[in-house]
Amino acid sequence: MNLRRTLPLLALPAAAALVLSGCSSSGSAGAAGDDGSGGAISVVASTNVYGDIAQTVGGDAVDVTSIISDPSQDPHSYEADARTQLAVSRADVVIENGGGYDAFVDTMLSASDSSAAVVNAVDVSGLDPDAEGHTDDEHADDEHSDEAEPSADATSDDHADEHEHDHGAFNEHVFYSLHSMGALADEIAHQLGEIDPDQADTFTANADAFGDRVADLEAQAAEIKTAHDGESVAYTEPVPGYLFDEMGLVNVTPASFSEAIEEGDDVSPAVLNETLKTFADGRVDLLAYNEQTSSPETEAVEKAATDAGVAIVPVTELLPEGDDYISWQQSNIDAIKAALDR
């Protein structure tokens, strides 16, 4: 059972204030849409990942509220309270991941009279094969395929003929797709510029600067691919799948294992044994362990990796305290490189 799904949701007013404090430039969740925002554009983001990108693009012109910044909370099962609903109803811009990751945002939008511009990261990414208007040609050079697991095996321009572009269950963790986050910043800048045309050039410049830093991360991922293309990795959940794809790393995790962990379902003994065997057989070069998930099964996988001498890289779905998006992904890239270079 997924530990993060067994924790009680923070629904009391005091707890809600804590949860909503994540990325607010004013330091108060209630500032979103309030007169106290000083005329700033109110932005509500489903998680602090998107809240941080919005803050980077909008600067002092935005007042950002991040609904979830507590690692014990799971966007898949989060239940909003009245305070969160109020923040969404007053927002000028709402940023969601989409793809079923944070469906509570759509629920709140539907329940309110909100006229907010909605930025959906999955839609912006173009990675969802089921999205309207999606074609393989739109992202032929995106590094993702689904042989063993959604967005699992490395696919790129160099590998277009080596790996079948097979659309399976969609990996909604698009915040690990570096290129997609650059595109998201551009879309946020566009929406903010529509609301405040006088500062549109500033928003665009901020998004461009963010994009330049993302491009540097992409260049580092490409260097790792040059050195480690085709090496095998495993993960407890497909959270870093898109980043692994950019690095040319091939996922060997049994799909039934990572899917069960992500959904909070029980893992059958046969599936667990199959997963553990990949480490005992020496088929794994690196394990990515989602720190926001803990269960007897994931702990058994972690132990198997340790016993086999496999490097373990912790990953998260939210920004660690003190990090912004760039520093967070830089830390991930540094950790992956160090693990593979051992």
Image (cartoon, helix red, strand yellow):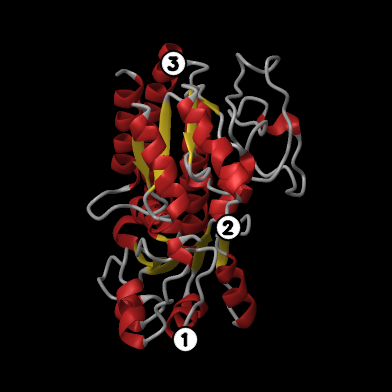
Please say whether residue 156 is visible from this viewpoint: yes
| Disc 1 from disc 2: Cα separation | 33 Å
For label 2, the crowd category at 10 Å Cα-Cα, with few meaning under 14, some 14 to 19 and many 20 or more, is: some
Say which element carries label 1: helix
Q: Is residue 238 above or below residue 53?
A: above
The three-letter code of the residue at mark 3 reads His
Say which element carries label 3: helix
Q: Position of 322 compared to 137: left or right?
A: left
- Dot 1 and dot 3 residues touching (CB under 8 Å): no
The three-letter code of the residue at mark 2 reads Asp
- Dot 1 and dot 2 residues touching (CB under 8 Å): no
Which residue is located at x 40 percent, y 22 percent? 219
Say which element carries label 2: loop
Pointer 3 or 2: first along the chain: 3
Residue 99: name its quadrant. bottom right
Q: Is residue 308 above or below residue 162?
A: below
**Residue 209 at x, y = what percent?**
35, 38
Residue beneath disc 2: 266
